[in-house]
Image (cartoon, rainbow, N blue to C red):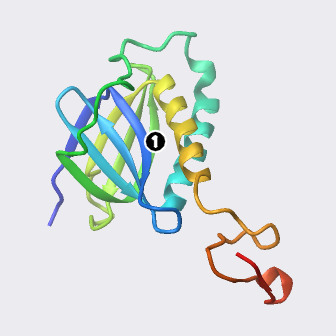
Amino acid sequence: MPSERHDFDVVARLDTDAVGTPGNRRFRLIVQNENETAFLWLEKEQLQALGLAVDQLLTKVRVLWSSRDPQVPPPTPGKPFDGEASVEMHVGRLGLGFDEASKLFVMIAHDVESDPDDPPTFRCLCSRSQLSRLSESINMVTAAGRPRCPICGSPLGNGPHFCPGSNGHVHGG
């Protein structure tokens, strides 16, 4: 059965955050237009991949525009957020693109339970500056997790760490 479709058109807010404590966090994109808020829940790896894709896309299309972004609603960093969302979904697949006519970026998302042939469950348009800020936010949110083992790169918890990089020896946590 096809999922409900949500088209947010040009967004006023595009941000990310983590909910919970390091080691037990959930990640989400927060997307707001003038009337609605969406939470797009992602795995940490999906969020990191989105950050890389944003950086690559911004670099790729840099030559296509002038120094000004097209008219989009101003960012609303000071706007209070009540934590309620009119749209909430767990993302299975994400896509990014650039619309040359409007000079805006397109983000689409497919619900994790949607069929591969279904159209996107969510769509929004955003500016270059919004995507650039999103990339910075993704880097900050994903870097704020648990410290990593310097040998194997695995996240460290409060207990002992069995490190495959040191032949399985226990390191203090």
Identify the residue at the far bottom of this view: 168
Quarter of the view holding residue 84: top left
Quarter of the view holding residue 89: bottom left
Quarter of the view holding residue 103: top left
Q: Secondary structure at mark 1?
A: strand
Check the picture and name the quadrant holding the C terminus: bottom right
Q: Give the residue displayed 27% in from the left and 68% down from the top.
A: 113
Seen in the picture, residue 50 relative to 173 is either above or below; the reply is above
Mark 1, other Cα within 10 Å: few <14 / some 14–19 / many ≥20:
some
Horizontal and vertical percent position of residue 33: 25, 30
Seen in the picture, residue 68 relative to 145 is either above or below; the reply is above
Q: Nearer the viewer, residue 137 or 4?
A: 137
Q: Is residue 71 left or right of residue 167?
A: left
Residue topped by disc 1: 96
Q: Is residue 135 left or right of residue 119?
A: right
Horizontal and vertical percent position of residue 138: 53, 44
Identify the residue at the far right of this view: 166
Q: Nearer the viewer, residue 109 or 158?
A: 158
Seen in the picture, residue 2 relative to 161 is either above or below; the reply is above
Q: Nearer the viewer, residue 166 or 173?
A: 173
Residue kind at label 1, given as amino acid type: Leu
Q: Give the residue displayed 26% in from the left and 44% down from the top.
A: 38
Q: Give the residue displayed 36% in from the left and 16% down from the top.
A: 74
Q: Is residue 101 left or right of residue 169?
A: left
Horizontal and vertical percent position of residue 41: 36, 56
Q: Give the residue displayed 17% in from the left and 30% down from the top.
A: 35
Report how many numbered discs are placed on residues in the image. 1
Q: Is residue 146 left or right of residue 97?
A: right
Horizontal and vertical percent position of residue 164: 77, 84
Check the picture and name the quadrant holding the N terminus: bottom left
